[in-house]
Amino acid sequence: MSHNPIRPWRSIERRKSRQIMVGNVPVGGDAPISVQTMTNTVTTDVAATIAQVQAAAEAGADIVRVSVPDQASSKALKEIVAESPVPIVADIHFHYKRGIEAAEAGAACLRINPGNIGSEDRVRDVIAAARDHGCSMRIGVNAGSLERHLLEKYGEPCPEAMVESGLEHIRILEDNDFFDFKISVKASDVFLSAAAYHALADVTDAPLHLGITEAGGLTSGTIKSSIGLGNLLWAGIGDTIRVSLSADPVEEVKVGYEILKSLGLRHRGVNIISCPSCARQGFDVIKTVEALEKRLEHVKTPMSLSIIGCVVNGPGEALMTDVGFTGGGAGHGMVYMAGKQDHKIGNEGMIDHIVELVEKKAEEIEAENAAAEEAAQ
């Protein structure tokens, strides 16, 4: 996001990084911050894996990673890549030959963990395969699998050890004239991850893949990821993100987008602004919002909707949203369109009515965007 002279307190100056391609998705430079997830199906169950990739893509994933632990998975990867609507990253651990096979199978990117991929010669073989097949690569440094010599040097996983690991493997790639890579320095500890990324951002122009690894379940992992990734993104650090949750990959995508939306870095779908509810509410806010979140998942157009229980903050919030509803008295509430009072409706049937209004507004926005694009050509 560039400098905002009207609201400078909303400005995020992104770190300047070089740009690489993951399939047809640009990562780094001035490209939008992409959202990733990873399948948790058995890769050799091709139908289940493809279904999960497609569900993640429908939820908004720009890139999906698939684990390739054995030769059978390498063979399955070729079928998965052919059916995937988004670029596939092959997750490689321990056996360098899986990286070569994944490149041959059509993976858009190879993720290798330097701490367990093996010798420099093996890494060079993977680099050669990536170059031959047009793959980019991700250096995936993880606090839980740092090289032994670094653990002996530093005594424990620390930001300095993680950055040193990353730079050692950047050197290997660059010594082999390979520059189409991004890098991550992940830890399950929010402080350690954030410190490592801040330090890494100062010493390389490579695109950074952000994540808090093994963050936990849906609630705890969302909170840890929001704190860690939010800290970095607000500082302008990060070119692609993956939220790691012990949950459905679709939930990872949703959380990732919500983090980016909260910082104004990406816009997709309906941003619902709602109150926590209290005794003043004129309708059941919590159940209404739960229903609207599900009913409006299909809307991809960026727009805003305010659902406020009473007139204390409702009119003010409605001024800032495309569609708004504020609870009133006697079982009725006020509908706002583009910040202005439009009409009253009864609480019964309000959910269906709001869904119709949002869908209609989304169609109008899309038509205006299409007209603007046509006029610009």
Image (cartoon, helix red, strand yellow):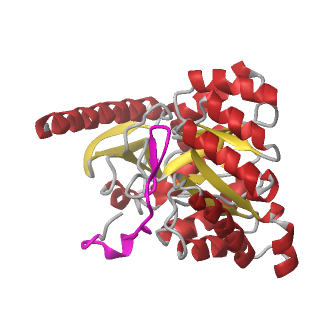
Name the residue located 72 percent from the left edge and 23 percent from the top edge. Answer: 76
Q: Position of residue 282 (x, y in %)?
A: 49, 49
Residue 172 placement (x, y as % from top left):
65, 61
Asked if residue 74 lies in the magenta stretch, the reply is no
| Quarter placement of the C terminus | top left
Name the outermost residue toward the bottom.
154
What residue span does the magenta drawing correspond to? 4-28
Residue drawn at x 67%, y 62% is 169
Query: Depth check: 32 or 103 in front?
Result: 103
Question: Residue 265: where, in percent of width, then height?
Answer: 42, 57
**In the image, is 213 to the left or to the right of 26?**
right
- Residue 327 visible in rendering: no
**Which residue occupies 76% across, 76% down?**
158
User: Which corner quadrant of the image does residue 88 belong to?
Assistant: top right
Mark count: 0
* Residue placed most toward the observer, 330 or 321: 321
